[in-house]
Image (spheres, rainbow, N blue to C red):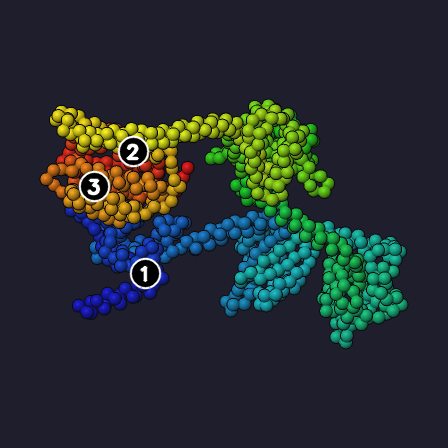
Amino acid sequence: MDTVTRSASYLQQIVDSTLSGITVYDCVRDENGTIVDYQIVLINQVAAAFSGRSVEELTGRRFFEEFPRLRETQIPDRYREVVETGVPQRFELAYRLTHRPDTNWFDVSVVKQADGVVSSFVDITATKAATASLAQQATLLDKVFSNSTNGIIVFDTVRDAGGQIADFRVRLCNQYAQRTNGYVMSLEAGRLLTELYPKTKEQGLFARYVALLETGEPFTGEHHYPHSGQWIQYSAVKLDDGFLLSFSLITQQKRLEQQVREEAQFSQGLLDGSMACITSLVPLYDETGAIIDFVYTAVNQAAVVLEGLPAGQMIGRRITQLFPGVVTSGLFDHYRQVFETGKTRRLENYYDADGYTGWLDMSVIRKENSLILTYLDITETKKTQQALLETAESLKGVLDGAPSAILLLDTIRDEQDTITDFRIQAVNQTGADMCAMSIKEAIGVPLSQVFTRYKEKGLFERLCQVAQSGEAQRFESFYDPDGGRIWLDVSAVKRGDGLVMSLLDISHLKDTQTQLERQANLLRSVLDSSPNLIIGFDAVRDEAGRIADFRYVVQNDLARRSVPRTDEDVIGHTMLEYFPSVTENGLFDMYVRVVETGLPQKQELYHDTDGLTGWFEVSAVKRDDGIVLTLLDKTEAYQAEQQRKELVAALQRSNQNLEQFAYVASHDLQEPLRKIESFGDVLTDQYRDRLDENGTDLVRRMQQAARRMSVLIRDLLAYSRLTTQRQTFTAVPLAYLLDDVLTDLEVTMQEKQAQVEVDSLPVVWGDPVQLRQLLQNLLSNALKFTRSQEHPYIRVAGRLAKGADVREPGGLLPGQQYGIISVSDNGIGFDEKYKDRIFGPFQRLHGRSQYPGTGIGLAIVQKVIDNHRGSIDVHSQIGQGTTFVVALPVEASPE
């Protein structure tokens, strides 16, 4: 088993070490033996990496379940043929992996293995791309080759049995070479060079071609064909085991040179008047007959000036002695070659030696035994050319970097000379991008091919107007190509029989403009719907920079209706034109402070000028170098305030009357009641013997009625004082108040053997006297309404809670903190349908004979709750007791 495991491990290592993706599959067949899938038996790291998963994740999985899109390729048919025929297959497959953005190409090989296949593949995407690129380059090269204005012939080497070069055979030649060749036979592929031109060896060209193959050194030259009278200039370069010969006709040039030579004598007299430098030199030979120098024989005035030497110091002197730079610059070699070959040369040379730095345009001609040098200082021309080239490159860079598409257009006309379209003659990079083409592809394309509907949208008509009238136009044009909508800023200028058109995509500007218009309309709607008068002003400054006035910028609808003035009446006018009173009431100075400090300002005042009457709250905030002014009409609020003050005064008078009533109740009314009780005591004490039982009962009833009246008056007095005599609120610890109340009720509690349990109580915000009344009345009720044969049990508890977290009692502010106090007893209870009734004055649920009292205790409790902006609720069941729940603010309540 270990051997098998090791073998499997070695096998996995071997396949993982290869650069190809390798996968071994077993066939998965249905009950009919048909192949329905392939199970992955072995897969190497390369194959797993292409799937984006690990070897472990894929081993044992079914191929088409993991890669369902491969069912749509040639893979299923290929695998099945290999399994059924046993014949290996190799093919290329294009497939886009799900985790990769582009399509990959694979070279796939499949061989049968048992009842399955072994598939290996190599990613050939890069090779495919390179092949396509080579094909494009070959196409381009073929076009260049076929359309070249030079003759091009490619020769292959023909070697003998000993490997020596025996001849050269034509492999390729272009059309120009066919038309202009100087050979006696047709230039067809396969022709030998010696057949085409038998004298090639005699002329020495054959030997030069052989040397070219051996050394690889290219060479150039000129050749004359006597039978046709043509001259060619040629160059030969090595190409594999052959060479490429390119040539061009210079017959006309040669004829011109001959003409120049013939006219040389006539021109000799003009040399000194020539602007070009002209010198004549003769060669100097060594003992072997090789040219080692040239000696000046003549110079013209322009050469004297340029070289900086008198003619006498140059004639008879060696050129290399006077100007050694001709050797290092390579000019001497040119001179020697011209003299030796007799072939004139024209060249431009940059010379930086012998005290001269600049460009020379040179012509070197052999005339009999002399060498004629004609040269002109073209340094400034070269600088100008370079500057123009740099300017052109810069301009091209500017144009290509411009955000506008710039197109040079030619007109397309029919037989009646009517413009039918425009053709792109030149375009910048932005224009090519807009055309969805390269610059090269766009040139020559009709405009209707790029903007397929531009004739329908009026753009064509506008361009025709510019081409016909010559008047430049600039306009905006809407264009809706397939899949989009475009706004273009179009500028067109006539140029020859065409136009220069620039296009700028302003769609985003249009969208922004639309959004700004919507926002402006929304803002105007908001301003116009405001219940306040709103005006925007810009500061108007004097020469010293001080604010001298404010100018209208905008106003809302209420401002238009209140003054009333339209926008046309006020926009552009100043504040002091319409509201001169602002300097008198101090508002102008306030506005200036707002602009200079940036701090908002507010003021209330009565205004009865400038078309506005009433009380206003004037607010000003800074806006750039100006203000936004808001006027809130508070006239109705002030009138309401005045009415409130009158009501408060009436209430104060009412309270004074109540206080007078309380005084009468506490003094004048109590005094007769005390006398009635006192006289009743005298009757019962001194005249008891004279009164029968009926008389004694009447006196007793009279005294009880007087006492009840006295208690009722005291309760009424206490109730009225809750309204008329309020103390300053403060933090009140309810635990301390409860201790005092329990002390007052101690006798009653002892008589009834009552048990009172007190939990921790919160500190609340209120009037200590009123809160003491609240606790005393609740506890008195609990001690009063008890069940017979059962000792009273009272529990007082408290906690803190937010109004939003309290379900009962209701009516609390959600964000306010409250102290929640509950007073529970085990008394007689009551039916909860009477829960709203029990808090009214003089409301009783039981007779006086059962439970004494005036029925005003809970009314006092309700009044205290109202005075403290709290809430109270009660829960009760007959025979089960009662629980009062009170909520009191723990801090000052918001007004």
- According to the picture, the residue beneath numbered tag 2 turns out to be 714
Q: Cα distance, mark 2 to mark 1?
A: 103 Å
Q: Earlier in the sequence, mark 3 or mark 2?
A: 2
- According to the picture, the residue beneath numbered tag 1 turns out to be 45
**Picture layout, residue 184 above or below residue 883:** below
Q: Amino acid at mark 1?
A: Gln
At 60% from the left and 37% from the top, the residue drawn is: 627
The kind of secondary structure element at disc 3 is strand
**Picture layout, residue 522 above or below residue 5:** above
Q: Residues within 10 Å of mark 1 (few under 14, many from 20)?
A: many
Answer with left or right where residue 546 lies relative to residue 80. right
Q: Cα distance, mark 1 to mark 3?
A: 81 Å
Q: Amino acid at mark 2?
A: Arg
Q: Residues within 10 Å of mark 3 (few under 14, many from 20)?
A: many
- According to the picture, the residue beneath numbered tag 3 turns out to be 824
Q: Position of residue 683 (x, y in %)?
A: 20, 29
At 63% from the left and 53% from the top, the residue drawn is: 183
Which residue occupies the foreground of this view, 616 or 653?
653
> Which residue ends up furthest to the left in the rendered image?
789
**Picture layout, residue 129 above or below residue 357:** above
Instruction: Determine which of the numbered discs, if any, sits on residue 123 in the image.
Output: none
Mark 3 vs mark 2: in front: 2
Q: The C terminus appears in which quarter of the rendering?
A: top left
Which residue occupies the foreground of this view, 205 or 854?
854
Q: Position of residue 414 (x, y in %)?
A: 62, 28
Q: Earlier in the sequence, mark 1 or mark 3?
A: 1
